[in-house]
Amino acid sequence: MTFEQSELQRLVDEIIELLQRYGNDPGALEAVFSELRAMYQRIPIYSGIIASLLPKVVQPVELGQLKEGSEITVVLKDNRAIAGKVSHIAPEEIKLVGCRQFERPKLCEELVLPASEVREMRLLTRGILDKERPSEIRK
Amino acid sequence: MLELELKRGDVVRLEGMLSLQIKDGKVSISGGLHEKGYKLVIPRAKSLPLEAETDAVIEYTLGESGSVERLAERTISREWDELIAEILREKPRLVMVIGNVDVGKSFFTTYVANTLLKHGIRAAALDGDVGQSDIGPPSTMGIGIFERPVGLMHEVPTRAAYFVGSMSPSNHMLEFIVGMKKLVELGLKEVDMVIVNTPGMISHGPGRALQLYVMELLNPDLIVALQRGRELEHLLMAAPPVKIRRIPVYEKVRSRSIAERTALRWMALARYFEGSSRIVLDLRKVKLGRCYYRTGDPIDPKTLGVRAPIVYAEKLPEGLLVVAESALDDEAMQELGAKFGQVKMIIKGSEQNVLVGLMDSANVFLGIGIIDEIDYARERMAVITPIRNGDKIAMVQFGSMKVKPTGEEIGTIKPGTF
């Protein structure tokens, strides 16, 4: 295969990897996206640097390593995800401030939506490559 | 077989699929004069004007979507004739033709070269449309010399070609630019004039970069801008200080859909690989190019100390390259990563159907091939190619496409995989 002619490919690989790794943690994904946007605005031609720094935005941490003021995300045993700033650490608990809580999506077989309740609606298209750029003449 | 009688000055539009033969008289096709006995096949999704230079009779057969239409007037505009008169007068050595897709760049190039030939000027055409290449197989750019008049550019024999490795210059800018320069240099040594037919990438970053850097590198004597409106003006404003001629596009020029372009490419590939055979190359004698594989120091996989189905390994400046029967688990990857840094993993078998360029010992392009298999342990590569004399192959350059010998494009490979 011909060589990579820019580091952009590495950045795309890294984004895909992080999206997969933190799919259950919206707080972590928000931080990754926010840092990606900030770095890309400042150094858009250095996609290799962005790719190398992006995985460092979210790192596993133990209770004993936490410091007050640190920003963390937590996934609880009931799958709730919480993001916030550490304000106090005790052996049995962590106190967070400025918290955001993300509920796990629930599966529902069937749902009736009153049209009056809909604010926005978006159409999803799967397999868009084959639909938009067919690789053969379809008769 | 149908027959069409033409009076001197009559003009018809021929739409492929169509095959024709001149039964009597003289006709002009793409600026070239043809007489009784001349045969031409116009493929599907291509069309050409034919002008009767004398009373003439043509015989033709229509294939799928083929047609013949009488036109009220010539399709060649006054501007074209004036431009050719100027070219004949000033004799530029290098002419660059730019324009969007489907503006008739190949037809224009053929028309100019055929007309020059009538005046005793030998011209070569460099076909830079790697996906729809008329000179050289798809995925290459080729140069051909007009030794006799032709109807379509693909009738011009390929004098030399350069393997780009993809059906578009996108992500292959370096190969594209190097190929253009090498082929232009070769052409200028052998003919009076080289006409460079550039791809239709004309806008956005990659398109602007491609056109402007090619202009800067080749430094043509004349740029011909084929445009419908003002779609090339952004390039012409930034072009180096060379003579520029703006030529309007013939309004009825046929545009091709993405699907038609793909189909044409597949047909061209299928034709190219027709009658191919499988040849086995000894990788101890044949060099590999445009890849990481076999550019480092080989390591015995048993010495890596991991329990993984690794069949080949080598140490690269970037880290470690391993070829495995199946994907390594996270534990093995972490273990190897701790020892060697970055680990590049190739899954055995993923090389099948990769398009490659085949070169001789003087680095001259011989043809393209499709990898059938690499035996990493025995250092052998099996390639499907129409090249008869496999002993001539001294280098294999990896491309970015996966194709079947039937012409079907299976997909592309991520740059840097091998």
Image (spheres, coloured by chain):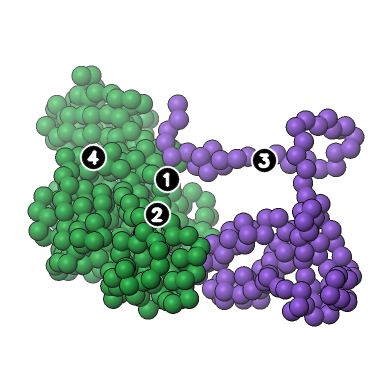
Chain colours: A purple, B green
Q: Which residue is mark 2?
A: B326
Pointer 4 with pointer 2, Cβ within 8 A: no
Same-chain check, marks 1 and 2: yes
Characterize the local packing of mark 3: few (<14), some (14-19) or many (20 or more) Cα atoms within 10 angstroms. few
Instruction: Residue at the far front: name it.
Output: A92
Characterize the local packing of mark 4: few (<14), some (14-19) or many (20 or more) Cα atoms within 10 angstroms. some
Which residue is found at the position 32% from the left and 72% from the top?
Answer: B303
Which residue is found at the position 37% from the left and 78% from the top?
Answer: B317
| Residue B286 visible, this angle | yes
Res. A93 image quadrant: bottom right
| Residue B239 visible, this angle | no
Q: Position of residue B180 (x, y in %)?
A: 31, 65
Pointer 4 with pointer 1, Cβ within 8 A: no
Mark 4 and mark 2: Cα distance apart in space: 35 Å
Q: Which residue type does callout 4 highlight?
A: Arg
Q: Which residue is mark 4?
A: B271
Lateral position of residue A121 relative to residue B30, left or right? right
